[in-house]
Image: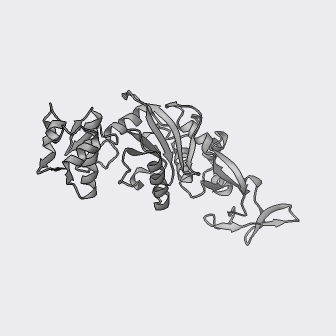
Amino acid sequence: MPSSIDRKAADLLLSVIETPDAVISGSVLDGYYGRVAPALKAAGILQPKDHSRAAVSLVDHEDEPVNLTWSPEHRAYGYFSPSAGWVNVPGDQLATYRVNFNTLLEQLLERLDLSPRTGPVELVPDLLWEVGDARLPGRSKRTSVWIGRRLCEPAIWKSFIDAARKRPAPGLRIVLSFTPGNRLPTDVHLGHTLIAVRDVADHNGHAVVPDLLAARVAAGSQLNDDLITMAADGASLTVRGTRYAFSGSKQRAIIRQLYDAWKSGHPELLTAEVLESAGYSTSVNTLAKAFSGRAEWRDFIREENGRCWLFL
């Protein structure tokens, strides 16, 4: 990531990314963000898209846009100002700048060990991309990574959920979001953890740091004040601040089912169905057998009369 891009430039970029068309007018870019605009243009992240017919007034009411007209006399676009007469608007301020997502994603993810390195695959046009499988510090297996924008919008969230159902997470999938974390949905699709780019970027705010990303994945994506939280891959459950880890895939499957039921508000499940869904044979017919050799599961899971549930 170019060192000339600082936190202020990154914050501006993230706000532009979250607009419907990921665009900003040249007059606004240069008029209000003149200090950071050159760095974003030089990095190739903001590129001219077309020409606007509106601009920010250069002499009157600077916070309001004015309509531009072509002046044959001046051979330029501009507007008439009561105080200054005809005002030409420089050509570069007529441009509309759009985010170049190919360049942005390449620079944003350059520190991640991704495989394959064939470039992002667009899953939802202009909104959601699959970028590959990342090898993160402290994790033996590579982790699927998607990245999306405007995920706080209900229609776009539905598109993400539809894409996730068509391409189920292989154990765990990280979804990096340009949307700030406090605006992201908390009801995350099974096997997915949503993490805001702002929360795992470097001090300049514009390149993902592998160590930060790995730490956020390990901590889980739920809100810190939840009484029960789960890592997206089911590897751990935190109950009232105590973390319980699970290494076996079948035990993780049990935890995921019970956690999802607890979150839904209908925590009780049939034990036989939970065990079958987790892949146990018919000889394992109780949670006591499934968790044989460890007793701490009884701290937060209850099993009675063929049913089981999480409790506090």
Q: Is residue 9 left or right of residue 66?
A: left
Q: Residue at x 43, y 31 (%)?
A: 142
Which of the pair 188/112 is nearer the observer? 188
Q: Residue at x 57, y 31 (%)?
A: 117
Which of the pair 169/119 is nearer the observer? 169
Q: Quadrant of the N terminus?
A: top right
Q: Is residue 16 visible?
A: yes
In the image, farthest residue toward the left: 305
Which of the pair 47/280 is nearer the observer? 280
Q: Is residue 255 visible?
A: no
Number of numbered labels in the structure image: 0
Q: Residue at x 34, y 42 (%)?
A: 232
Percent position of residue 151, x then y: 47, 54
Q: Is residue 153 left or right of residue 228?
A: right
Which of the pair 70/138 is nearer the observer? 138
Percent position of residue 168, x then y: 43, 44
Color scheme of the displayed model = one colour
Percent position of residue 78, x then y: 77, 64
Percent position of residue 255, x then y: 25, 43
Q: Classify residue 110 by image quadrant.
A: top right
In the image, farthest residue toward the front: 282
In the image, farthest residue toward the bottom: 82
